[in-house]
Amino acid sequence: MYHLFLEFDNLEPGVKSVEDLKYVIRDDKHTAFVMSAVVARFIKDALIMNQTITSLKNCRFAFANGAEFVEFDSKGQSTRFTDTPDWFITPGAFARSQWLVNHELHDLMTPQFISTFLEMFSDVKKRREHCNLLFDLQLEESPKRGKPGVKATRQTRGSTKQKISDLGSFELFSQFFTRLKKAVEANQFPTVQVLTDIDEVAKVPAPLKSAVRTWFKAISSELPPNSKRVGAGNAALFCAPVRAQIQHIEAYGVERYYKKLSKAIADGGERYIADFTFKL
């Protein structure tokens, strides 16, 4: 029996407060809920103080849309995962299953479901986000349609760029940094797959992918090498300047470096990764 708590930005949380969390974990039955950012922060802060928390025994937590994972065993001992665990469920799959049950929407007739759903989400943006997950509309991947009577214009390449991102976790940055160092010391291209230790780019959670690309750009002034760059060969030439930067960061202090980088990312606002630079 486990209690599963998931931090998803685009799903209405069922566990919104620490009091909600305490109420849910009293139950001996298996439960699964979306948790709010407040609850997620509470758990992360608690883990800073103690790695064993008996009150959280048999609880599993997925943070930041599936970028971080922690599991507490039957004695409350925590285990962190660098790879996606088997128990993780994607936002879309969760929305179409347990989320409906938690919000008592699963057994409503269609007209009642529609009216209840509209009452729940008067905000159009929230309604759109939930419909996107419930019906797998893939709205974020759909091309924008032009308005009638308006001549379509070619989108600039900048519109497809990713914006800078940080996960706010030195532990995750440290794992990334260790993988980067290992790769460049072996003259291996530090691709996104290598830096996340996930074989398929498609399986890398979007928040983690964006943060890794941002961190790499800050260190190397380059984006992680794609398949075209890897295919061109000469990994030693690519890795040499990155090795030098790693040595510089280690001399400065990795955690100290990350604190400054994290602040720079936060201060950077809506900047694109491709345009982002960071110097000590």
Image (tube, grey):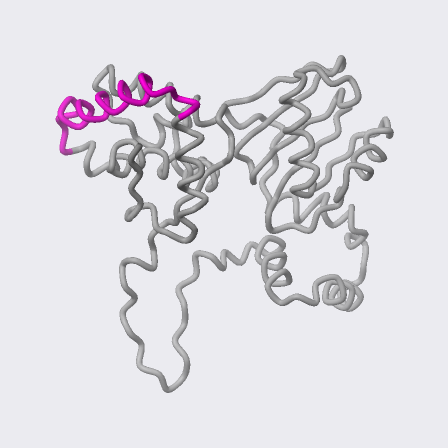
Report the quarter where the N terminus lies: top right
Mark count: 0
Give coordinates of residue 178: x percent, y percent.
38, 18
The part of the image, by quadrant, that contains residue 135 is: bottom right
Report the quarter where the C terminus lies: top left
In the rendered image, the vertical position of residue 91 relative to residue 23, given as above or below = below
The part of the image, by quadrant, that contains residue 28 is: top right
In the rendered image, the vertical position of residue 157 relative to residue 43, given as above or below = below
Magenta highlight: main SS: helix
Q: Is residue 58 magenta?
A: no
Task: Identify the residue at horizontal 78%, vertical 55% (top origin).
Answer: 105
In the rendered image, the vertical position of residue 278 relative to residue 104, given as above or below = above
Task: Identify the residue at horizontal 19%, vertical 36% (top origin).
Answer: 229
Q: Is residue 238 magenta?
A: yes
Task: Identify the residue at horizontal 27%, vertical 63% (top origin).
Answer: 156
Give coordinates of residue 246: x percent, y percent.
28, 22
Task: Identify the residue at horizontal 56%, vertical 54% (top origin).
Answer: 136
The answer to which of 131 and 18 lies nearer the viewer is 18
Side of 24 relative to 182 (left or right):
right
Give coordinates of residue 130: x percent, y percent.
63, 56
Side of 268 relative to 69 (left or right):
left
Magenta-drawn segment: 232-256
Give coordinates of residue 267: x percent, y percent.
43, 46
